[in-house]
Amino acid sequence: MFGILRLFAVIWIFGFIVLALAATSSYLYSDEAQPERSQRWLARLKMSLVWPVAVLSRAGRARLRRG
């Protein structure tokens, strides 16, 4: 049981890092105005924290695909 929890934690951390890097890259190279850009970046960072929950629903998967 402990091994499964450890595997889940490693996958969650890896997914968080990948999604957070994608959000930060989009933030840095966007030509959008500052308030909208930072709001979108924060929303994407929040989504990267809860991505395992988002994968379990159809709306969450669509949101992850859209960014």
Image: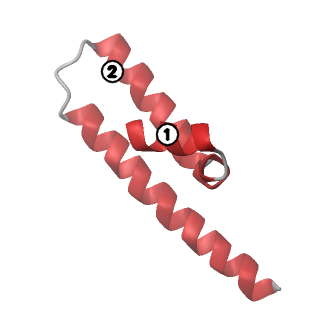
Task: Measure the alpha-carbon separation of dots 2 and 1.
Answer: 20 Å
Q: Residue at x 20, y 28 (%)?
A: 30
Amino acid under disc 2: Arg
Residue that badge 2 annotates:
37
Q: Residue at x 27, y 37 (%)?
A: 26
Say what secondary structure mark 2 lies in: helix
User: Residue 33's spot in the image, x, y percent?
Assistant: 25, 12
Eye-nearest disc, 2 or 1: 1
Amino acid under disc 1: Ala
Q: Residue at x 16, y 21 (%)?
A: 31
Q: Which mark is residue 62?
A: 1
Q: Is residue 36 above or below residue 43?
A: above
- Left or right side of 30 for 10: right
Q: Quadrant of residue 35?
A: top left
Q: Quadrant of residue 29?
A: top left
Say what secondary structure mark 1 lies in: helix
Q: Is residue 67 above or below residue 53?
A: above
Instruction: Categorize mark 2 by other alpha carbons within 10 Å: few (<14), some (14-19), many (20+).
Output: some
- Left or right side of 40 for 57: right
